[in-house]
Image: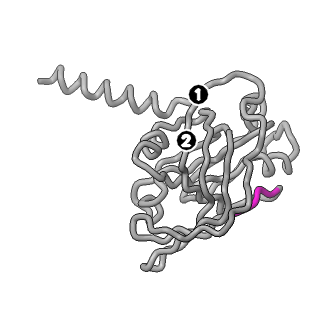
Amino acid sequence: MVKYLVFCVFVAAGYIVYTNFPVNHGPGITAKEGPEIKRLTWQEPFSFKGATLTPKKTIEAEVRIIKRKRYFFDSFSRYSPVDAVVGWNQLSDERNLDYIFFTLDDRTHDVDLTRPPVEVSTIYQESDLWHFIPSSASVEEQLKQLRDGHIVKLEGLLVDIDHDEGFGYQTATEVSGRYNDSGFAIWVEKFHIR
């Protein structure tokens, strides 16, 4: 019985270490282009888990996951179980990311610019905070498997969220060169990890 418990502890510890260990791609840009955000012809708001989601724009992107975090107990976790700080172009290069430190907590992110290897404006132009809202169970399972360093390709909608109980979230709709503390709420329709 004790051997079985020890075995279970080792398996659980191995899984936790594996899922928190970042994916290493080596030096070089791994996601060249920024997100492609396009205007959306009017699309009717739709219901999701008791909230109303209002589509604002479409998004298509291939980005690097710089930092990701799963949420379980906040009011937004019902809709978005995973947040990530993503980067593209120079912010997808490990040579640069070794000197830029992102933190992700309470649905916001921060950056420590101790010795930035690129201009500060480039850091803000080529990274952002994304709140992933899975459109299906299979997308949700893929989101839960995300690790820091993964390169992901996705298609979806930027959405505002309104709930009758007073909870609401308004998404950003443009990539800017300034710090974006609210981030993008993305209804993820297609998702691929490479």
Judge whether 85 appears above or below 117 on screen. Answer: below
Q: Residue furthest right?
A: 119
**Tag of residue 11:** none
Q: Report the magenta residues as a range.
A: 172-176
Residue for point 79% across, 51% down:
124
Judge whether 44 appears above or below 97 on screen. Answer: below
| First reached walking from the N terminus: tag 1 or tag 2 | 1
Residue for point 51% across, 74% down:
162
**Tag of residue 23:** 1
**Tag of residue 191:** 2
174 within the magenta span: yes
Amino acid beneath label 2: Phe
Amino acid beneath label 1: Val
Q: Viewer-proximal residue, 175 or 10?
A: 175
Label 2 SS: strand
Judge whether 41 appears above or below 96 on screen. Answer: below
The location of residue 28, given as percent across then percent down, is 77, 25
Q: Where does the C terminus fall, quadrant-wise?
A: top right
Q: Viewer-proximal residue, 120 or 150?
A: 150
**Number of other residues with Cα within 10 Å of mark 2, as a class: few under 14, some 14 to 19, many 20 or more:** some
